[in-house]
Amino acid sequence: MSESELVDHMIAYYVAGPANDLNIATRWYPYGELVLIIEDKFSVAVRKFGTKVRGKSKLAGTKFLDAMIAKGVWETKQNDFGGSMHQFQTDKFRAVVAELQANDPIIVKAKAEGPEYWDKAFAELVG
């Protein structure tokens, strides 16, 4: 199993479906709190694929969060104490997710092969 391949599939799976329902209050969050929130979202989304997959939720969630911050999905500002705070931008998130759903090679392959793709892919990645 390639850890990065597993994480990429977890992110693709999340973006392909559960991300459509993500809604985070538009208050300012410290980075660490966002990591916990997104890790939980990933853990719930991939629980049906078993503990080996679910165990990588923090890694996948953090990679996803960092990519979304880089794309401007979370507006970032520096606080008075030297740290960063982040605010969810719903419209920007929906646009980025739609772009990824249309162009991510893993998601495109999953759409072509049907819903059984995910079960098979995760079983191979952790088997």
Image (spheres, rainbow, N blue to C red):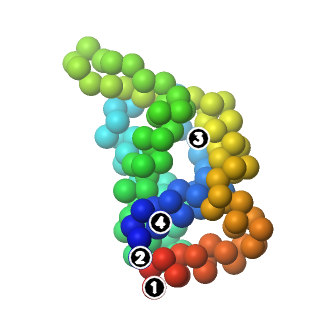
Determine the secondary structure under disc 2.
Answer: loop
Of residue 111 and residue 94, the one placed in the foreground of this image is 111
Q: Are marks 2 and 4 in contact (CB under 8 Å)?
A: yes
Disc 3/disc 2 C-alpha distance (Å): 32 Å
Residue at image coords 54%, 64%: 9
Residue highlighted by disc 3:
23
- Label 3 sits on a secondary structure element that is loop
Can you say whether 93 is above or below 11 in the image? Answer: above
Compared to residue 17, the image places residue 74 above or below, namely: above
Q: Does residue 49 show up?
A: yes
x, y (%) of residue 125?
A: 48, 77
Camera-nearest label, 3 or 2: 2
Which residue is more in the foreground, 91 or 3? 3
| Residue annotated with mark 4 | 5
Front residue of this view, candidates 7 and 83: 7
Query: Mark 3 or mark 4, which has the lower sequence index?
Result: 4
Tag 1 and tag 2, C-beta contact below 8 Å: yes
Between disc 1 and disc 2, the foreground one is 2
Find out whether the residues at labels 3 and 2 contact each other: C-beta distance under 8 Å: no
The residue carrying pointer 4 sits among few (fewer than 14), some (14 to 19) or many (20 or more) residues within 10 Å by Cα, namely few
At 62% from the left and 73% from the top, the residue drawn is 118
Task: Residue under label 1, please give it.
Answer: 127
